[in-house]
Amino acid sequence: MTRKIRGRRIPLALLLALSLLLSFATAVFAHGERAQQANTRMRTLNWYDVEIGPATLAVGDRLTIRGRFRTSKLWPEQIPSVEDAVYLNVGAGGPNFIRLSANIDGVSAVQSTSLELGKDYAFEMELKARRPGRFHIHPIMNVRDAGSMVGPGRWIEVSGSETDFENTAETMFGRKINLETFHLRAIGMWHLAWFVIGGAWLFYWLRQRPLLIPRLRAVDELNERGEDPDSLIRPADIKVALVFVATTLIVIVLGFAWGERDAPITIPLRTAKATMPDDKPFPQPNAKVVIDQASYRIPGRSFRMDVTITNSGQSMLQVGEFLTANVRFINPAVRRVKPLDEHDLVAPNGLRIEGGGIAPGETKSITIFAEDALWETQRLTRMINDPDSVIVGLLFLYGDDGSREVIEVGGSLIPVFE
């Protein structure tokens, strides 16, 4: 009886464990960017003015992603930077969209390119919905040897049926093709052919004795006795190997001839990098911000920054927003921002300023508080565990004349545990 009860408990325990995993699956699927270190999200790319829409569309409709990003001057030295090679991409949880176009500062970004640190870039991508469903869409910058720098995301609802999707193209000779099914049968045939050839080669050697580990031991024993390990290879093995080599070469030649007959004129995939303009200026804001001291009070989820701001413009400036790691802290006394949905990383009342505005020509010290649970839910408090513990973000100052200054701020962070 005891064994039966224990035997029943095991499947129940496995079912319970699976249920717990599935309960967390939605959050992980939607916001996998939280897994990135806070240091990486803050000090690499800060995305802003990002628009992803429309929020609801049908299969075959177009989705536009546009916005701006600032490459940080305080990029971590241990992470390869955008100065090497980057690729503007989109995160959509699978092949649910196709990308029709992409550009950075108006330059086509269908290929990789290089950027400069400390500069502002505008980007735009146009997608086409391929499958129905609910998807979390992000702009992404893939940095060579560093991984993906994920921008802010938005949930998109796609209705309709996958059978309604069309992805056609016209060749230079006027031939119209469906890219979803073009040469799909030939692709399957080639996969099958190489699977058969590779499987036959493995089958021949696996049927030999000794197998794998025993064969390795046999080679070691021959080496220990000073004998040639090649003695394990029989003349018949050499003949079979020659047959496989000849068959492989024949298949390659026939495939090449078939391809030349079917498509005599082809264009290879482009491997050159797109070039950004060399004369792009660095941002020249009408204000200068210096962090005097920055701290994070862990019990209260409160970030404090004492800054000195010099206003060299012609309008009164007020701090309206602080953005870091895709999280936006808004000062409601300056501007109102309504989150797009419950997943939008906006703290509409999360920014508090002590010190008021900065008059034209004035240099003033003010204190900025960014306080919200998003510090915890987005795992940004992990920055206190970094060896250098540096905070980086964008400060948005708004003028009385409607102007806006976007200034990158950064400096050492002091954790406060009480």
Image: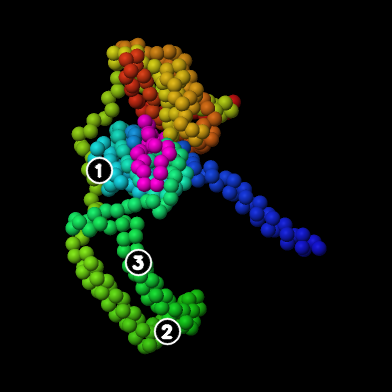
- Residue at (42, 24) in percent of width and height: 321
Q: What's drawn in magenta, residue-wise? A: 41-65
- Vertical comparison of 256 with 47: above or below: below
Q: Quadrant of residue 205?
A: bottom left
- Residue sticking out furthest to the bottom: 235
Check disc 1 and report the residue beneath it: 108
- Residue at (26, 74) in percent of width and height: 254
Does the stretch in magenta take in 186? no
| Residue 395, percent from left and from top | 39, 25
Looking at the image, do the residues carrying marks 3 and 1 touch, with CB atoms under 8 Å apart? Answer: no
Name the N-terminal-most of marks 2 and 3: 3
- Quick one: SS at disc 2? helix
- Vertical comparison of 340 with 163: above or below: above
Give the CA distance from mark 1 to mark 2. Answer: 58 Å
Look at discs 1 and 2 and give the one toward the viewer.
1
Image disc number at residue 185: 3
Type of residue at label 1?
Answer: Ser
Name the N-terminal-most of marks 1 and 2: 1
